[in-house]
Image: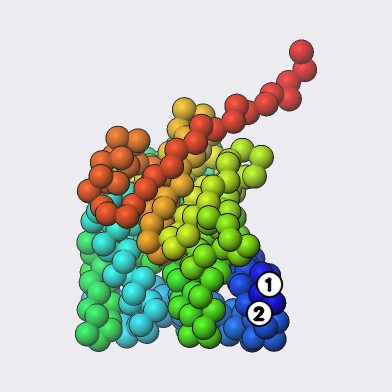
Amino acid sequence: MTHAWQFQHYAMATTFQIVMVSDDNDEAQFAADAAFREIDLIESELSRFRPGSDISRLNAAATGEEVYVGPGACDCLLLARDVAQATGGAFDITIGPLFKLWRGAGSRHVSDEDLAKARACCGWQHLEVTPSGPTATKKVDGMHIDLGGIGKGYALDQAAELLLDWDIENALLSAGGSSVLAIGTAPDGSKGWPVQVGPAEQLPTFLTDGNAVSGTGFEVQGEHIIDPRTGRPCSMTDNSRPIIWAQAPNAALSDALSTAFMVMSRKETEELCRKQKGIIARFFPKEPQSSNKPR
């Protein structure tokens, strides 16, 4: 008898979950274990916190030094470049110096001079990626790469590919509360897998199959994120800005786009969706924040 089996694994500072349809519990367990090993391997290659990872070595390399990277890191760097181009720089994996500047400033004023210095160390167009190597080369001093906005989605895509190798054709994979990838069909004749990204008390659930949905910013530390195009923070507490889900054919792309949508205007986001086939933005108003002030 076919069942929907559920498995969990902690990696990339979040909990990955796989729900798969199979008539064999042992087979499902073996497939899940293999998928989670793949996710662990990807983390070891992409995490900037792991000494010896492709991204750590790239960050430590001298300007102009050609650094060999594995296929996973190369895939992510190339996709990050494509998304940066498509979003006009709203997604940029090189803005580590800007995060460091604003987080270090606290309540202090950031001078135009300090901001200009940090911005000079950033810019996706200053990172050269050569797929034939595959290699990557930083073209400006002080550049720091962070694949946090794309890595979890990429891990979901690779895990899904591995499940297909195990003949698991119907599954729902998720990375914490931020990205979900559906493959095949849902069990029990359902029209699609139920998908919900972000706070369950605020956002709806809808049915999907064969694509990915991501949302970013639900657990942001502090009140701001950085807009790579200006180098300045955008307020995350502004209720006039809706919560946005990015729906795309794969999870790496939806992950990256959800990050970009956080700083793009609604007009910019809708224009991108019109131009890019298979990309959908879903807008949801934020719940008003309750006040704890005494009356």
* Residue at 69% over, 86% down: 26
Q: Which residue is mark 1?
A: 3
Three-letter amino acid code of the residue under disc 1: His
Image coords of residue 136 (percent x, y): 28, 77
**Left or right of residue 51: residue 92:** left
Disc 1 secondary structure class? strand
Residue found farthest to the right: 294
Q: Which residue is mark 2?
A: 23
Task: Please identify the quarter of the rendering in which residue 63 is found.
Answer: bottom left
Q: How is the image coloured?
A: rainbow
Reply above or below: 219 against 70: above
Is the residue under label 2 in contact with that under label 1 (CB below 8 Å)? yes
Reply above or below: 283 against 47: above
Three-letter amino acid code of the residue under disc 2: Asp
Task: Please identify the quarter of the rendering in which residue 210 is found.
Answer: bottom left
Image coords of residue 250 (percent x, y): 40, 64
